[in-house]
Image (cartoon, rainbow, N blue to C red):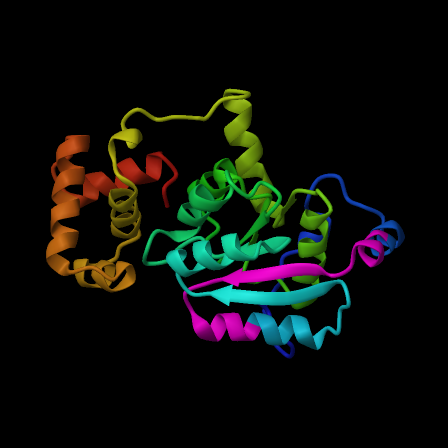
C-alpha cells in the first residue's frame, strides 16, 4: 500500500481490469446503491490501520469500512454474521490464508465480492485465489485512490488486477479453457508443503521459514522431508529448481 507522502511506485489498478465502467456512470450507480461496505482481512494490525486511515483520508463517499479481522477464523465468523459488499483479502496468513476464507464463505455467500490485496505477485498466489472465487487481485504497492477505485469496480461486477498479474490468469485458463490447470506432481503436495517449498526455493533458512509460517523448525524439517520424498528429489537445491520450473517462485 502506498500511503500519502510515500514515493513508492504504484500499480495502475484503476485501468487494469476488464470491462471498465465510465466514471460518471459508475459514480451515479454508487450513489443510487449507497456506499460499498468494505471488510478488511489481514493478519497485520498496523497494515489494517494504515488501509483504514488511507481510505478515510480520501473522504470518498463511495466506501464505508464496516469491519476487520486478523485471522481466517475471525474473518469467517464476522463476514458470515453480517456480510459486507467487498472483502479486501490478504493472501498469506498463518492459519490458512485468503483461500481458506474463500473456501468457507464464497459458496454460502456468493454475493460477497472478494478482492485480494497482497504483497505477493507470484502467479500461483494469483491463480489460487481467483480459482477460489476472488474477483480481482492487487498488490500492496497500490495507492489509496487506486484501491478505492478497484473496490468500487469489483462491487459493480468488474474484474480488477494489477497490470502484470492479469496475464497470469489469462495464461493459466487459456491452457485448458473451462478447467483447472493441474500438475500431477504438484498436486501431491499439501498446501503447507507448498508454502514451505516456496520459501525454501526463495533461499530462506529453516529458521526463517519457521518464523514466517509460525511453526517449529522441527515441523519445517518434517515438511521438507515429505516434499523430498514425494518429488523424489535428493536435496534443497534440486527442490529449488523443481519449484522454479513450476513457477512457484
Q: Residue at x 53, y 39 (%)?
A: 133
Q: Is residue 165 left or right of residue 232?
A: right
Looking at the image, the residue that sits furthest to the bottom is 5
Q: Residue at x 48, y 45 (%)?
A: 105
Q: Which one is nearer the viewer's eye here, 4 or 100? A: 100
Q: Was residue 40 drawn as part of the magenta stretch in this picture?
A: yes
Looking at the image, the residue that sits furthest to the front is 81
The image quadrant that residue 239 belongs to is top left
Q: Is residue 86 left or right of residue 108?
A: right
The image quadrant that residue 93 belongs to is bottom left
Give the percent coordinates (x, y) of residue 43. Answer: 41, 65
Q: Which one is nearer the viewer's eye here, 113 or 49? A: 113
Give the percent coordinates (x, y) of residue 106. Answer: 51, 42
Give the percent coordinates (x, y) of residue 31. Answer: 84, 58
User: Can you say whether 111 is above or below 31 in the image?
Assistant: above
Tell how many labels: 0
Q: Which one is nearer the viewer's eye here, 45 or 36? A: 36
Residue span colored magenta = 29-50
The image quadrant that residue 214 belongs to is bottom left
Q: Was residue 64 drawn as part of the magenta stretch in this picture?
A: no
User: Can you say whether 206 is above or below 224 in the image?
Assistant: below
- Is there any visible trace of residue 208 in the rendered image? yes
Give the percent coordinates (x, y) of residue 168. Answer: 53, 37
Picture quarter with the N terminus: bottom right
- Is there any visible trace of residue 125 in the rendered image? no
Q: Which one is nearer the viewer's eye here, 64 or 205? A: 64
Q: Residue at x 73, y 47 (%)?
A: 156
Q: Residue at x 88, y 50 (%)?
A: 25
Amino acid at each position: 500500500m502506498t500511503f500519502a507522502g510515500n514515493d513508492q511506485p504504484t500499480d495502475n489498478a484503476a485501468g487494469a481490469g476488464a470491462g471498465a465502467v465510465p466514471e460518471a456512470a459508475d459514480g451515479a450507480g454508487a450513489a443510487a446503491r449507497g456506499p460499498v461496505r468494505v471488510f478488511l482481512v489481514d493478519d497485520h494490525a498496523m497494515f489494517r490501520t494504515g488501509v483504514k486511515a488511507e481510505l478515510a483520508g480520501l473522504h470518498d463517499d463511495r466506501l464505508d469500512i464496516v469491519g476487520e479481522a486478523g485471522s481466517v477464523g475471525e474473518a469467517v465468523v464476522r463476514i458470515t454474521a453480517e456480510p459486507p459488499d467487498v472483502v479486501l483479502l490478504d493472501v498469506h496468513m498463518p492459519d490458512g490464508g485468503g483461500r481458506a476464507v474463500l473456501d468457507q464463505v464464497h459458496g454460502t455467500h456468493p454475493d460477497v465480492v472478494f478482492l485480494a490485496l497482497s504483497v505477493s505477485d507470484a502467479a500461483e498466489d494469483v491463480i489460487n485465489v481467483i480459482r477460489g472465487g476472488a474477483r480481482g487481485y492487487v498488490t500492496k504497492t497500490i495507492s489509496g485512490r487506486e484501491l478505492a477505485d478497484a473496490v468500487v469496480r469489483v462491487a459493480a461486477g468488474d474484474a480488477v488486477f494489477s497490470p502484470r498479474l492479469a496475464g497470469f490468469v489469462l495464461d493459466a485458463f487459456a491452457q485448458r479453457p473451462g478447467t483447472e490447470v493441474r500438475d500431477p506432481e504438484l498436486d501431491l503436495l499439501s498446501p503447507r508443503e507448498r508454502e514451505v517449498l516456496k520459501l525454501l526455493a526463495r533461499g530462506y533458512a529453516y529458521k526463517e521459514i519457521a518464523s514466517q509460517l509460525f511453526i517449529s523448525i522441527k515441523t519445517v524439517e518434517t515438511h521438507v522431508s515429505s516434499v523430498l520424498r514425494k518429488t523424489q528429489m535428493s536435496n534443497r537445491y534440486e527442490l529449488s529448481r523443481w519449484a522454479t520450473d513450476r513457477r512457484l517462485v
